[in-house]
Image (cartoon, helix red, strand yellow):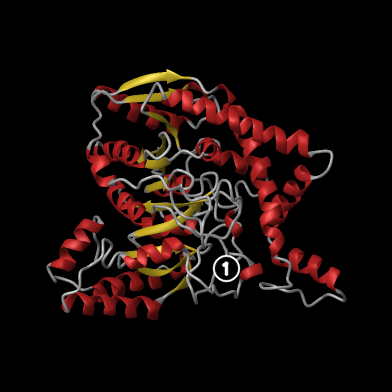
Amino acid sequence: MQFSSYEDLRSQLFSKAITCEEVVRSYLERIDRHRDDNIYITVFHDAALERAKALDRKFQEGGVPGKLFGMPMAIKDNLAIKGARLTCASKMLGSYESVYDATSVLRLEAEDAIFLGKTNMDEFAMGSSNENSAFGNVPNPFDKTRVPGGSSGGSAAAVANDLAMVALGSDTGGSVRQPAGFCDIVGLKPTYGRISRYGLVAFASSFDQIGVLALNCDDAALVLGVMAGKDERDATSSSHEVPDYQAAMAGVSVEGLKIGVPSEFFHEGLNADVARIVKGKLHELRDQGAELIDITLPESDYAIAAYYILVTAEASSNLARFDGARYGYRSENSEDMAAMYVNSRSEGFGREVKRRIMLGTYVLSAGYYDTYYKKAQQVRRVFQDRYREALEKVDVIAGPTSPFPPFGIGDKTANPLEMYLADVFTVPASIVGMPAVSVPVGFDSLNLPVGMHLICNFFEEGKLLGIAKQMQRSL
């Protein structure tokens, strides 16, 4: 049982050709067949079926179906669902169960979505390959010797393998968009504050944003519209009006579209196949009436450095709460409280998490704060000014999602700096807080997916998804 889109599924549910229970059973059977791929950490077999049966009864009794009636969804395992495990793919939280629901979960369930389970990820969302999980890595759907991207690799692989219709991820520097590009699906990071972060385990609070992974732009827009909006429990959530994203998408035309193409995004280090495919897609759009405008973003070389200074600083603060004293993993090899703190964190956190905590503590320490952290904040402001200036001249900024196609499992684990470069094109949108999306645009010579990355101005998600949809349609 497969569906091209949620619209396809909804029409069949409304015609009573199928039931929610049949849909959920079909997905759960596929999830069980893919168990060796390690995509889900927790599967809600019983809970998902019970919810499906309840929705079927509601519909049969004349109840009004919600906007997401019967949509089978996956959720990254750093988002809270009351009574379910919330591991963040870490030994530190391996057996922890959430005591409350994330706002995004409540809003989706209010519109009759069905959660199938919690997906694998890089530990505490720190990574670009899903190799940092305490539960093991996830293979790429197109080549099991390669990575699916990260940190939302499990969510991306779930959608690409048809183990969920739509999945939630979190995006700090590209953790929704980069795995979407590696798995040939749509990955949306909305404007910072567009979706409440309440119930999302914090990595870097001024960057973290819940994102959507889907097979198409319409499904992404539908789910975004349900989750978006002010939340009194999250002071950083925006009160900006939530528009009709489908209507905004429908108003987008390629004719006359001004696409900014930064020269800095097509440097010598860019994979030749990626450059060829992305430029080919841009030329197709030009032939359909779009205008390609060369722009420059000269500070781009500083994006990765500024980003990792800022996010590691915030991570060192946010992860201080995991000390073995209140909840989570506690070391049994401790003679006193001080040793318990040290041992619990040393044993509970993985290598990449410890690396980032140490880097963050260093850049915040006396004598280095002004040199590193303060300077990175100043660079962040410069980025915001440059992107605002660029988007006054163009409708969208376009480039590759990643400088290379999906790489082999283990290829970059020994070189963290090379791994960090996987996010070189996605990080700028996170630094400035603007909405961005990765849309599939083709396959390289090894039949591996290539994604294009698009950035629009603040709160222009409808326009952004409309442009992305035009690209998908012309494939």
Q: Residue at x 30, y 68 (%)?
A: 112
Q: Please state, as top left, top right, bottom left or bottom right, where the N terminus lies in the image.
A: bottom left
Would you say 122 lies left or right of 361 here?
A: left
Q: Looking at this rendering, what residue extends furthest in the right direction?
A: 335
Say if 425 sits above or below 47 in the image.
above
Rendering coords of residue 317 (x, y %): 70, 54
Q: Quadrant of residue 10?
A: bottom left
State whether residue 277 appears in this view: yes
- Towards the viewer: 273 or 265: 265
Q: Please state, as top left, top right, bottom left or bottom right, where the C terminus lies in the image.
A: top left
**Picture mark count:** 1
Q: Quadrant of residue 321?
A: bottom right
Q: Secondary structure at mark 1?
A: loop
Q: Residue at x 57, y 55 (%)?
A: 125
Rendering coords of residue 349 (x, y %): 69, 62
Disc 1 residue type? Thr
- Towards the viewer: 309 or 180: 309
State whether residue 163 appears in this view: no
- Towards the viewer: 28 or 323: 323
Rendering coords of residue 2 (x, y %): 25, 62
Rendering coords of residue 256 (x, y %): 26, 23
Circle 1 packing at 10 Å, graded few (<14), some (14-19), many (20+), is: many
Q: Quadrant of residue 420?
A: top right
Q: Residue at x 66, y 68 (%)?
A: 92
Say if 88 sits above or below 237 in the image.
below
Q: Which residue is mark 1?
A: 87
Would you say 427 lies left or right of 439 here?
A: right
Say if 181 sits above or below 261 in the image.
below
